[in-house]
Each structure stands twice: as C-alpha cells, then as structure tokens.
Amino acid sequence: MLKLYFAKGSSALASHLLLEEVGADYTAHEISIQSGAHKEGAYRAINPKMRVPALETAEGIITENPAILNYVAATHPASGVLPDTSFGRAQADAFNAYLCATMHVAFAHKLRGARWADTEQAREDMAAKVPANLRDCAQLIEAHYLKGPWILGDQYTTCDAYMILVPQWLSKAGVDINEFPKLAAHRDALMSRPATQTVMAAHDL
C-alpha cells in the first residue's frame, strides 16, 4: 500500500488526485503545516526537504509532484493516464515541469517571499507581481498548451491532475479564471469527475 503525506490545500492536492483517479491502493496522512509538523523529526526522516507531498512506496520515498505523478501513472498502466508514446510522455513532462518550476514558483512569491528576499519591501514587491505573473502563465496555457478537452487532447493524463492546482493559485492571487475560457472549461471538467470531488472534500476545498 502506498502512503501519501499531504497538507490540506497544498500542492499535494495534485498527487492526491491522481492516486484517487487511478484507483490506487493508498492511505493519506495529513501533515499540518500550520502546527509545524513538517519540521518535526518524524516527518523530516521521511522528507528532509520538509515539504509535501511525499509518497512512501515499497521501494522508498518519492518527493516532488512531477516524480510522484509519473510513478503513479507508470505503476497503474491500465488507467491510461500516461501517454503511449515517448513524444507524448515528453510533452507531459515538459508541461508538468512548467507548472512546477515556473507557475508554482510565481505563486509562491505571494506567501513565501522570505525564501528569496530578506527585506519587507522586497517581499511586498514580489507579492505585488504575483497576479500579473500568474496571468502570463495562464495565458500561455490557454493559448498554446490546452489542446482540449484535456491538456494533451482527448486523453486525461498526469498533466490534468496537476492542473487542479491552477484554479487554486489564480483564485488566491485574485485572478478570475473566467478571463481564460479554456482554463475555466478545463476546471469544470475536472470538477465533474468523482475522484476530484472526493479529493477536494478531503482537502476541505
């Protein structure tokens, strides 16, 4: 059985969603960021980065959403969430890397500015840029990467599970997702799926 370590409302939502979507045999263990549980020894032994998600497997621990998503997809081939071709898998990896390394980091500047800046003024300047930066990311996805109805076209993949975070980031930054009709339609399609509804409830969303 797999064990997912998550915090409610965190980026672990994406990995949690894919586990539910593919029907994985897993349990979910909440790590309270608010209480500092992610910094305590028990969790640091699982993930020394002190972040979520982390996935415990029979072979060891996997961290970072892109890696967890790929592992879950690869170990549940009947689910069809992993593209069939090498090029398709590379496309999925490229998109997921963009969400991880660019859009998530752009959002993190709103709440986690202390990671990059020491002065209050610098952190305020970073936070002020978040809505514009997220709009740029959303527009790029809207124009070039949402082939529809899912990210890579007709097939629901790891990319679509990761996309569950985008409406959350936009909303928290005060950006109306309805500025981007394709993204709004994708969100609605995701929210209509039973797995999404189950996981959103588990995260109190």
Image (cartoon, rainbow, N blue to C red):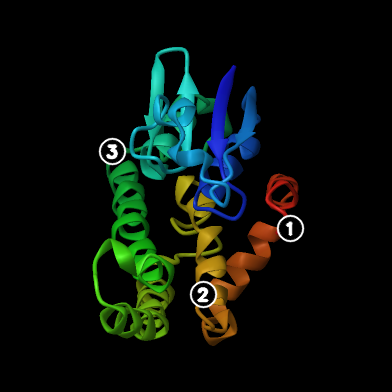
How far apart are the two marked residues, 2 and 3, measured between alpha carbons? 31 Å
Q: Nearer the viewer, mark 2 or mark 3?
A: 2
Relative image position of residue 173 (x, y in whole percent): 50, 78
> What residue is pinned by disc 3?
86
For label 1, count other residues whose C-alpha is less than 10 Å away and answer few (under 14), some (14-19) or many (20+): few
Relative image position of residue 108 (x, y in whole percent): 39, 65
Which residue type does callout 2 highlight? Leu
Q: Is residue 74 visible to the viewer in this orientation of the structure?
A: yes
Tell me which numbered mark, 2 or 1, is placed earlier along the sequence.
2
Which residue type does callout 3 highlight? Ser
Which residue type does callout 1 highlight? Ser
Taking the spot 32% from the left edge, 47% from the top edge, the residue there is 93
Relative image position of residue 80 (x, y in whole percent): 53, 36
> What residue is pinned by disc 2?
170
Q: Which of 46 and 53 is in front in this view?
A: 46
Tell me which numbered mark, 2 or 3, is placed earlier along the sequence.
3
Q: Which residue lies furthest to the top in this view?
A: 58
Tell me if label 3 and label 1 are in contact, CB under 8 Å: no
The answer to whether residue 132 is above or below residue 83 is below
Please tell me whether mark 2 sits on a helix, a strand or a loop.
Answer: helix
For label 2, count other residues whose C-alpha is less than 10 Å away and answer few (under 14), some (14-19) or many (20+): some
Location of the N terminus by quadrant is top right
Q: Which of 84 and 193 is in front in this view?
A: 193
Tell me if label 2 and label 3 are in contact, CB under 8 Å: no
> What residue is pinned by disc 1?
192
Tell me if label 2 and label 1 are in contact, CB under 8 Å: no
User: From the viewer's perspective, is 147 left or right of 28?
Assistant: left
Taking the spot 66% from the left edge, 30% from the top edge, the residue there is 23
Please tell me whether mark 3 sits on a helix, a strand or a loop.
Answer: helix
How far apart are the two marked residues, 2 and 1, measured between alpha carbons? 19 Å
Please tell me whether mark 1 sits on a helix, a strand or a loop.
Answer: loop
